[in-house]
Amino acid sequence: MRQLALDTETTGREISEGNRIIEIGCVELVGRRFTHQNFHRYINAERASEAGALAVHGLTEDFLKDKPLFKQIVEAFIEYVRGAELIIHNAEFDTGFINMELKRASQILGRNFGKITDHCKIIDTLPMARQMHPGQRNSLDALCKRYSIDNAHRKLHGALLDAELLASVYLAMTGGQTTLFGDDTSTGAQTQHQQTQRAISPEFNSRIIEANADELTAHEARLAAINKATKDNCIWTKPTE
């Protein structure tokens, strides 16, 4: 499974007011592991950012004036995302801008680039977070705090940085069970933290460790105790069909 956490920065919030994309960042995950084969482009939107947007990302018109136009990076972008699953926080915003840029590029270059969903699937982490944490703040910063993901270096928003944080948040949100029986002495917060740290580690490589004789004996004893407590109804001691 190839997944891409994606984020964009724009000159402002409203497409109807002529705002454009000025940065795209994608972080690649394959098999839930960071590959470091990312996609990152600054884009010359040929216009200045609105004051509110500039305060968020700090990307000035002067900094972007020598960067490529979207039409010059569209083919590389489409090739990179093709067939992947895009993970986006508040996908409606980013896909709206991407589809607008694809339409403009199609008209200028005389080619039909379609919509982003013609090339890949979309996972929106915002409704996921709202379902998992109803009634709580579910911004990317709030989720980083909730899942103990360090974002102290995030002084300004940046598409690639935010995509990296989003990838870590997504892995933490979808990390699943980490132990079979758990530790009765550990708190839920500790368990969540351990799960998060394992889920977000880019260098994590799983290993298969075979049980030794003592561990197998302990395992059988644990199953026997469960079977006794459940009056011979332990499913793990029953022969498979």
Image (cartoon, helix red, strand yellow):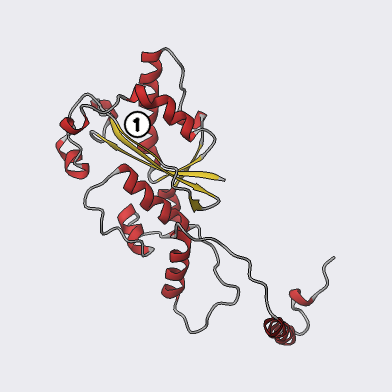
Left or right of 92 on screen, residue 9: left
Point out residue 194 in the picture as x, y percentages from the top left corner: 45, 70
Quarter holding the C terminus?
bottom right
Point out residue 216 in the picture as x, y percentages from the top left corner: 71, 81
Residue 98 location, quadrant: top left
Point out residue 102 in the picture as x, y percentages from the top left corner: 40, 24
Q: Which residue in the rendered view is the most extreme toward the top?
A: 110
Instruction: Please state which of residues 12 and 7 is positioned toward the viewer in this rendering.
Output: 7
**At x 34% / y 31%, what residue is drawn?**
97
Residue 179 seen anywhere in this rendered image of the structure = yes
Q: Is residue 167 above or below residue 23?
A: below
Q: How many marks?
A: 1
Q: Badge 1: few (under 14), some or many (20 or more) residues near its Cα, within 10 Å?
A: many
Instruction: Please state which of residues 28 and 175 is positioned toward the viewer in this rendering.
Output: 28
Left or right of 129 on screen, residue 209: right
Point out residue 199 in the picture as x, y percentages from the top left corner: 47, 61
**At x 21% / y 44%, what residue is drawn?**
56
Left or right of 141 on screen, residue 123: right
Q: Amino acid at mark 1?
A: Phe
Q: Is residue 9 above or below residue 218?
A: above
**At x 53% / y 80%, what residue is drawn?**
183
Instruction: Please state which of residues 154 and 65 is positioned toward the viewer in this rendering.
Output: 65
Instruction: Please state which of residues 214 and 98 is positioned toward the viewer in this rendering.
Output: 214
**At x 67% / y 82%, what residue is drawn?**
215
Q: Is residue 139 above or below residue 239?
A: above
Q: Which residue was labeled with disc 1? A: 97
Residue 96 location, quadrant: top left
> SS of the residue at dot 1?
helix
Left or right of 145 on screen, residue 185: right
Residue 139 seen anywhere in this rendered image of the structure = no
